[in-house]
Image (spheres, rainbow, N blue to C red):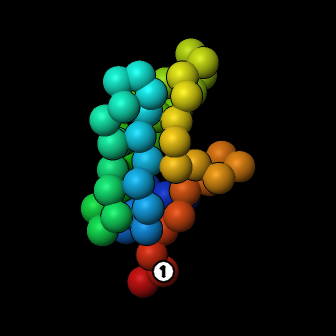
Amino acid sequence: LAEAAGQIAAGWVGAYPPGIPLWVPGEEITRSMLEWLTAFLAHGGYVRGLQQGKVKVIIQ
């Protein structure tokens, strides 16, 4: 996940609950988003949009 900082998202990623997307396609993935996501996962949170702990990004 750390390598995704500064990259452009190719897909949706959302935390459940509350079910609100953390980022959407075309949005820059920031370090603060990744820090929040990592902490959420560490506390047992469920995240939709990850594939084997990885995110899809647009290759620039």
Q: Is the residue 42 above or below the residue 37 in the image? A: above
Is residue 21 visible from the viewing direction of this image? Answer: yes
- Could you tell whether 42 is left or right of 31 in the image? right
Residue at screen point 60% across, 18% down? 44
Residue kind at label 1, given as amino acid type: Ile
Residue extending farthest top: 43
Residue at screen point 65% across, 53% down? 51
Q: Position of residue 59 (x, y in %)?
A: 48, 80
Q: Is the residue 59 above or below the residue 51 in the image? A: below
Q: Is the residue 52 above or below the residue 27 in the image? A: above
- Could you tell whether 22 is left or right of 3 in the image? left
- Could you tell whether 6 is left or right of 4 in the image? left
Q: Position of residue 13 (x, y in %)?
A: 44, 47
Residue topped by disc 1: 59
- Could you tell whether 59 is left or right of 54 in the image? left
The C terminus: image quadrant: bottom left
The foreground one among 23 and 39 is: 23
The foreground one among 45 and 29 is: 45
Q: Is the residue 38 above or below the residue 9 in the image? A: above
Residue extending farthest right: 52
Q: Position of residue 23 (x, y in %)?
A: 33, 50
Secondary structure state at the residue bearing disc 1: loop
